[in-house]
Amino acid sequence: MVVDDELLAGAHRAIERWGWQQATLERIAAEAGVSRMTLHRRGVTRPALLAALAERLETAYRSAMWPALTARGTGRDRLALALAGFCDALEANLEVLSALAEADHDAIFHEEGPRGLTRAGFTEPIRRLLDDGTADGSLVADDPEETATLVLNLVSWTYRHLRRGHGWTPERARDGVLRIALDGLAAR
């Protein structure tokens, strides 16, 4: 399958406009400025496009985490920065995330095994910040690995629901979710 940035951008726009179920290959092709036959010749499928969009999402997530990982300040301050960046990445991908939830969500986000954790590719930056916050006394996380899964899911699911289900503004959803997440981890 041949997928370039323009095709992925077109797939992203089609999903944003029509949702995953209605984002047909014809609509994706139109958004990407190519013919449906071009997609056929390239061997492009909807599941493959969604998998490529999931990879882009993981890259966007890691980019959003980087400033917090390299910043100065307490673990709590840096976690707040990381989670605000995470909300920005969520905002840019609301419909793609919904599509991923409808598709093979487990393969993209979940590790195999009895603990049922989110893949380390997503939780590692948060775990590192939790470790830093525990070390400097600004956060409490008895099991940073599990807590990272909790925080990631708390922020992503709640933010998306408030944006899509309740129509909250990005700022209102972000501020409310982050206040609860950070207060729940604050060292007492």
Image: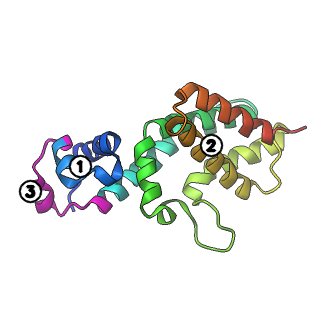
Q: Report the amino acid beneath label 2.
A: Val
Range of the magenta residues? 31-48
Residue 32 position in % (x across, y down): 19, 43
- In the rendered structure, the answer to whether residue 165 lies left or right of residue 6 reads right
Quadrant where the C terminus is found in the figure: top right
Q: Which residue is mark 2?
A: 155
Residue at mark 3 to residue at mark 1: CA–CA distance: 16 Å
Q: Is residue 139 above or below residue 113?
A: above
Residue 166 position in % (x across, y down): 55, 35
Q: Report the amino acid beneath label 3.
A: Met
Q: Secondary structure at mark 3?
A: helix
**Label whose residue precedes the other's in the sequence (3 or 1):** 1
| CB-based contact (under 8 Å), mark 2 and mark 3 | no
Q: Secondary structure at mark 2?
A: helix
Q: Which residue is mark 1?
A: 4
The image's mark for residue 37 is 3
- Furthest-bottom residue in this view: 114
Q: Is residue 184 above or below residue 74?
A: below
Residue 172 position in % (x across, y down): 60, 26
- In the rendered structure, the answer to whether residue 10 lies left or right of residue 127 reads left
Residue at mark 2 to residue at mark 3: CA–CA distance: 40 Å
Residue 8 visible somewhere in the drawing: yes
- Residue at position x 75%, y 48% in the image: 131
- Furthest-right residue in this view: 188
The image's mark for residue 23 is none
- Furthest-front residue in this view: 166
